[in-house]
């Protein structure tokens, strides 16, 4: 969805920070600590790191390569990948590409509401209201009241879309600010939490090896799911960023860097939340309420709590906006590629109307439960699986490997390709089947 002059990221680090910004979000800040707290602590971490290494080196780099090869996002990339077999299959791939693209749009609609709640918490931290309320009652009130975050929702959607006006360059420039600030803020918070009495128990939980817990298959399943979605390897979003990557870049190298920084983001979030929960005897597996109930309660009880609350929610707003940028860009670029007469401003206005219209019609946040279940349990896993199968089973091997090996000092060969075909693809299939089974069973 870019003009030619804006069709590439200017620097490798700009690309990496934008990609990390897409991956870093709620999945890191409450998803990773919550799942780590619920599924074995250090055992979950071990399994998670193994999956991140595989998915980053193979899955993420494949999505970057597919996007760069086609110089467009989801729809065109699926069509081009399938067309390596024949033109008729290419048309089939172009149609199938609508499914992961729909997943990006659906998750963006719900995600914008969640980020609006974060912005409201940021506002209440500035006014000081957050420092005096019963946090559970505070969150319960505005999360069950219709149209309670309308102004914040409008600010988030319009503000995010404005950052996309100049294409890849504006995405790069905003993330060069947002992502370093995000990391600095969470390091500051982690240092502060380390000073809490009892925080040491949280560190033991995180890092003292619990080898017996690795026998639990659910530890591996949840770690695999978290790795998939933390890296945004969903068969859609990262493809469009790959389309803006220059031919001089080693896609495996930049994918590995992206995975490393995404993991660091998850770890610094966990180093804030898990030790704090142990220090205060709170449930570390509480999920979204970690951000809106647990952490504010802790911040009320420490010196300079209001300052740290402002710092926390600043970082969270940045994380949310950077993820939304990718979701909107993935959809917008594909629409403009499919319908070339549409210009960027028209597409952005259309996305604004859709996001605000659907979002406002389904407030409050608890109305989003069934919607987000459909998206996360069906559309996103199926889209991720469709992408994995398309790259490693449908697309011709030589076409994929030629793109992977552009600008590499040491070309990747059978080991990389077979890791994708026989490890990465089965992981996607397992995740998809488990998600569907768990929905049916429970």
Image (spheres, grey):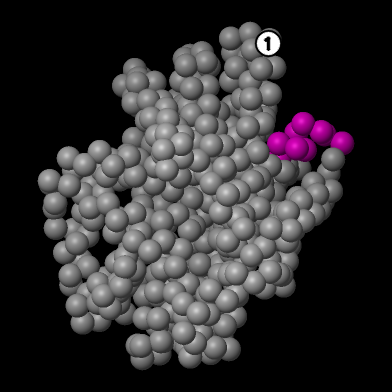
Q: What's the residue at 65%, 42% (across, down)? A: 330
The answer to whether one can see residue 234 in this image is no
Q: What's the residue at 41%, 52% (across, down)? A: 262
Q: Quadrant of residue 247?
A: top right
User: What element does badge 1 sit on?
Assistant: helix
Q: What's the residue at 31%, 21% (across, down)? A: 415
Give the labeled residue for mark 1. 87
Q: Quadrant of the N terminus?
A: top right
Residue at the far right in the pictured view = 341
Q: Is residue 338 magenta?
A: yes
Q: Please state the horizontal and vertical placement of residue 68, each as a whole percent of the image.
A: 58, 32
Q: Is residue 309 magenta?
A: no
Height in image: 284 above or below 253?
below
- Is residue 348 left or right of 51 when viewed as pictured? right
- Is residue 373 left or right of 150 when viewed as pictured? left
Answer few, some or many: residues within 10 Å of disc 1's Cα (few below 14, many 20 plus, some between 14 and 19).
few
Q: Please state the horizontal and vertical placement of residue 413, each as a whole percent of the image.
A: 36, 19
* Magenta-colored span: 333-341
Height in image: 156 above or below 28?
below
Height in image: 99 above or below 132?
above
């Amino acid at each position: 969805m870019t003009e030619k002059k804006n069709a590439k990221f200017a620097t490798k680090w700009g690309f990496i920070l934008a990609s990390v910004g897409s991956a870093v979000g709620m999945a890191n800040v409450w998803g990773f600590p919550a799942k780590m707290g619920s599924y074995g602590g250090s055992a979950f971490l071990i399994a998670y790191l193994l999956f991140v290494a595989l998915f980053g080196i193979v899955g993420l780099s494949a999505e970057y390569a597919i996007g760069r090869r086609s110089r467009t996002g989801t729809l065109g990339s699926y069509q081009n990948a399938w067309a390596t077999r024949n033109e008729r299959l290419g048309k089939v791939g172009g149609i199938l590409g609508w499914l992961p693209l729909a997943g990006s749009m659906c998750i963006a609609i719900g995600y914008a509401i969640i980020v609006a709640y974060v912005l409201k918490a940021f506002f209440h931290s500035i006014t000081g209201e957050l420092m005096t309320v019963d946090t559970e009652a505070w969150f319960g009130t505005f999360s069950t009241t219709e149209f309670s975050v309308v102004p914040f929702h409008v600010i988030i959607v319009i503000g995010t879309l404005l950052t996309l006006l100049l294409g890849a360059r504006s995405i790069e420039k905003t993330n060069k600010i947002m992502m370093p600030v995000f990391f600095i803020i969470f390091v500051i918070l982690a240092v502060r939490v380390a000073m809490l009495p009892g925080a040491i128990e949280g560190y033991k939980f995180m890092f003292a090896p619990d080898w017996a817990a690795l026998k639990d298959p659910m530890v591996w399943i949840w770690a695999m799911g978290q790795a998939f979605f933390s890296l945004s390897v969903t068969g859609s979003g990262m493809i469009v960023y790959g389309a803006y990557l220059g031919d001089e870049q080693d896609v495996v190298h930049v994918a590995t860097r992206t995975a490393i920084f995404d993991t660091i983001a998850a770890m610094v979030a966990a180093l804030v939340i898990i030790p704090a929960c142990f220090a205060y005897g709170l449930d570390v597996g509480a999920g979204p309420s970690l951000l809106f109930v647990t952490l504010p309660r802790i911040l009320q009880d420490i010196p300079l709590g209001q300052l740290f609350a402002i710092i926390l929610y600043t970082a969270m707003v940045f994380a949310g906006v950077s993820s939304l940028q990718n979701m909107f860009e993935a959809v917008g670029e594909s629409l403009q590629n499919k319908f070339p007469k549409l210009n960027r401003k028209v597409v952005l206005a259309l996305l604004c109307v859709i996001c605000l219209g659907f979002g406002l019609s389904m407030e409050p946040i608890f109305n989003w439960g069934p919607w987000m279940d459909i998206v996360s349990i069906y559309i996103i896993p199926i889209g991720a699986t469709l992408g994995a199968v398309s790259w490693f089973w449908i697309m011709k091997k030589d076409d994929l490997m030629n793109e992977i090996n552009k600008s590499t000092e040491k070309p990747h060969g059978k080991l990389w390709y077979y890791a994708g075909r026989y490890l990465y693809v089965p992981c996607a299939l397992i995740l998809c089947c488990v998600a569907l089974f768990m929905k049916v069973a429970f």
